[in-house]
């Protein structure tokens, strides 16, 4: 199923019981964030898209959490289940020659369907819903109900964007989903990271001497158009071709009123302007999908020349923060859709999972049909060389009899098979620009874990002996627990360093893995433990092996190596030369306000807050 525009999608959500309307007046500064955060972490029965009909300071309603469950993300993509996406693409890119006349006709029909979807040229119109209202004199983005998402954010941010640029010299279009900071009504900050297409266009403009590069920020449209800017397409592949294929018909464009660009005609709002590739301004901080504030940095400045919108526009936005949130399911759609492309380059891949706790780039789990020694390492290096998979900080490779979507099964296979001295590969390379733990900006230690079995009859490692609990408590106090042959420690670093604790614990219990976390961490919340561990570790600096150095040639009869991970916050004394970011928490007064007003919102039984300041757990 495809949709004409955002409001068509909202009608579908409402008919399916997936949309809640809030008619009570609410503030765009933190209040909408707190309401949305509470609902977005609930099971599907409570987790709904939200339409705020009365946002203080704006005449326009606001829609949020549109893609916040796998069911809604599937609806947005026009499928019943997200796995249908990889099935559709796999059928399209199947390079085997069809056998028989019927198969040939089916393949021809598929190809013709794609051509009909994407069109043989741009579909243009002279009149468009997104230009029912045109503002070229003193345009001001503050007419929109733009959110201040988190207390320490540098200002208000436009988040659910499709930012359109054309590369100077080639005219190739790029569409990216980049956050945009509002400095004032006509001046915006464009946060595109160094690995993204917008940054490439900026650099091309520098080299060609451009001083005014057109840019348009599109808000709304049909959900395939809204999502496609987040898709990690190869360079020079137009994101709107992907949107057209997904929805089964070409995207219709209209010329901007003040810039030489085309934008989707069915959008809700369009902000037009230009940027000078040599002009920068401090952008941030911003509470990001990592669960931490991205620190301020220099980014390009957009100068607004026009705003166009529908007569009765709806402002779409999204919220990021500690997972799971809406972006998890947008990323899951990407994972499912692009799985066939991974298989095209590495046919032994069976499935892939990027868990929410890994915030996309911190952990990727892959299952393969293993055929030879070193096969897992081949996959690791292949993925690290495949587009934006180069940013994956952690890879786990398992055999194809393990369901990678089942994290319990993956964890058990790792415990059964991995000798941490022999079965890990540590490399240095590119990491996400938002990774706060790396030694250098965008460059740090990464790990690949070979959890495949040497043979199908390989016996699992034996279960370790019981822990000497009294001795551990004498060393650490009560702030530790054991789970899955792993000791979790919440450490007061004023008394011990993490690696000192690991070495002392291995004297008492040499057959256990160890993860050391900050003293405030709730050791019983394993999802939170996993998120912190994956986010806070540089695998070159923060890992110890109980038996010493990594040795890929260690004999099978030697003592098994175990891993110790320093997942604490760090500073220069820990060998971390960069500043450590602040964790995202909501302001107590906002938490209290939303709790007090919950019945006014009409959202059912009260839901407790998630992002409150941590205190040490007993």
Image: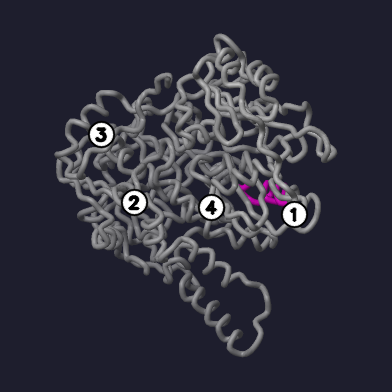
* Residue 240 vertical position relative to residue 329 in the rendered view, above or below: below
Q: Residue 44: which numbered mark, if any?
A: 2
Using a 10 Å C-alpha cutoff, classify the residue at mark 4 as few (fewer than 14 neighbours), some (14 to 19) or many (20 or more): some
Say whether residue 383 is magenta.
yes
What's the magenta bit mostly, secondary-structure-wise?
helix
- Circles 4 and 3: CB atoms closer than 8 Å: no
Q: Nearer the viewer, residue 448 or 182?
A: 448
Q: For mark 3, what is the residue?
A: 31
Residue 267 percent coordinates (x, y) = 33, 57
**Residues at marks 1 and 2 touching, judged by CB atoms closer than 8 Å:** no
Q: Secondary structure at mark 1?
A: loop
Q: Would residue 352 be visible to someone looking at this image?
A: yes
Q: Is residue 36 magenta?
A: no
Label 1 or label 4, whichever comes before in sequence order? 4
Q: Secondary structure at mark 2?
A: loop
Circle 4 sits on which residue? 405
Q: Quadrant of the N terminus?
A: bottom left
Q: Earlier in the sequence, mark 4 or mark 2?
A: 2
Structural distance between the alpha carbons of marks 1 and 2: 40 Å
Of the numbered discs 2 and 3, the one sitting upstream in the chain is 3
| Residue 386 shown left or right of residue 434 in the figure | right
State if disc 3 and disc 2 touch (CB < 8 Å). no
Secondary element at image label 4? loop
- The numbered mark, 1 or 3, whose residue comes first in the sequence reads 3
Q: Residue 268's spot in the image, x, y percent? A: 30, 54
Q: CA distance from mark 4 to mark 3?
A: 34 Å
| Label placed on residue 457 | 1
Q: Which is closer to the viewer, label 4 or label 3?
A: 4
């Amino acid at each position: 199923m495809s949709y004409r525009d955002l409001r068509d999608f909202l009608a579908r959500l409402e008919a399916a019981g997936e949309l809640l309307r809030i008619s009570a007046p609410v503030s765009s500064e933190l209040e909408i964030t707190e309401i949305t955060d509470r609902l977005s972490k609930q099971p599907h029965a409570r987790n709904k898209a939200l339409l705020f009909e009365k946002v203080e300071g704006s005449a326009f309603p606001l829609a949020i959490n549109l893609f916040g469950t796998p069911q809604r993300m599937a609806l947005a993509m026009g499928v019943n289940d997200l796995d249908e996406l990889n099935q559709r693409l796999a059928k399209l890119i199947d390079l085997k020659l069809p056998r028989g006349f019927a198969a040939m006709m089916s393949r021809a029909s598929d190809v013709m369907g794609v051509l009909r979807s994407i069109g043989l040229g741009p579909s243009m119109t002279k009149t468009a819903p997104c230009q029912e209202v045109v503002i070229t004199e003193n345009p001001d983005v503050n007419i929109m109900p733009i959110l201040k998402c988190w207390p320490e954010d540098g200002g208000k941010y436009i988040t659910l964007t499709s930012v359109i640029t054309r590369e100077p010299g080639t005219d190739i279009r790029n569409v990216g989903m980049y956050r945009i900071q509002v400095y004032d009504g006509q001046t915006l900050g464009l946060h595109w990271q160094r690995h993204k297409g917008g940054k490439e266009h900026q650099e091309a403009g520098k080299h060609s001497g451009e001083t005014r590069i057109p840019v348009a920020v599109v808000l709304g449209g049909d959900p395939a158009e809204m999502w496609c800017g987040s898709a990690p397409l190869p360079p020079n592949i137009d994101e709107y071709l992907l949107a057209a294929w997904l929805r089964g018909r070409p995207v219709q464009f209209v010329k901007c009123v003040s810039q030489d660009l085309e934008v989707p005609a069915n959008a809700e709002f369009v902000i037009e302007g230009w940027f000078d590739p040599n002009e920068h301004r401090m952008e941030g901080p911003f509470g990001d999908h990592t669960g931490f504030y991205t620190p301020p940095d220099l980014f390009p400045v957009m100068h607004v020349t026009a705003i166009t919108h529908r007569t009765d526009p709806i402002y779409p936005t999204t919220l990021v923060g500690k997972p799971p949130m809406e972006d998890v399911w947008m990323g899951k759609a990407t994972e499912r859709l692009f799985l066939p492309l991974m298989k095209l380059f590495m046919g032994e891949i069976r499935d892939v999972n990027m868990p929410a706790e890994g915030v996309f780039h911190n952990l990727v789990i892959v299952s393969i049909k293993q055929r030879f020694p070193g096969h897992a390492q081949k996959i690791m290096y292949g993925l690290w060389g495949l587009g934006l998979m180069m940013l994956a900080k952690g890879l786990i490779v398992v055999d194809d009899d393990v369901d990678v979507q089942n994290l319990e099964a993956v964890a058990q296979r790792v415990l059964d098979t991995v000798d941490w001295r022999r079965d890990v590969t540590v490399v240095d390379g590119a990491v996400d620009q938002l990774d706060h733990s790396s030694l250098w900006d965008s460059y740090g230690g990464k790990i690949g874990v070979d959890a495949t079995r040497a043979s199908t009859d390989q016996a699992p490692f034996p279960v370790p002996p019981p822990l000497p609990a009294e001795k551990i408590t004498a060393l650490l106090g009560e702030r530790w627990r054991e789970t899955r042959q792993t000791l979790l420690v919440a450490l007061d670093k004023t008394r011990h360093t993490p690696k000192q604790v690991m070495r002392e614990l291995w004297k008492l219990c040499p057959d256990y893995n160890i993860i050391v976390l900050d003293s405030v961490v709730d050791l019983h919340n394993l999802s939170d433990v996993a998120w912190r561990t994956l986010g806070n570790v540089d695998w070159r600096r923060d890992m110890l092996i109980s038996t010493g150095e990594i040795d890929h040639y260690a004999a099978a009869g030697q003592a098994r190596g175990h891993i110790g991970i320093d997942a604490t916050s760090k500073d220069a004394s820990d060998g971390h030369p960069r500043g450590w970011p602040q964790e995202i928490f909501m302001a107590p007064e906002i938490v209290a306000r939303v709790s007090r007003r919950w019945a006014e919102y009409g959202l059912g039984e009260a839901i407790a807050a998630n992002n409150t300041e941590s205190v040490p757990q007993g």
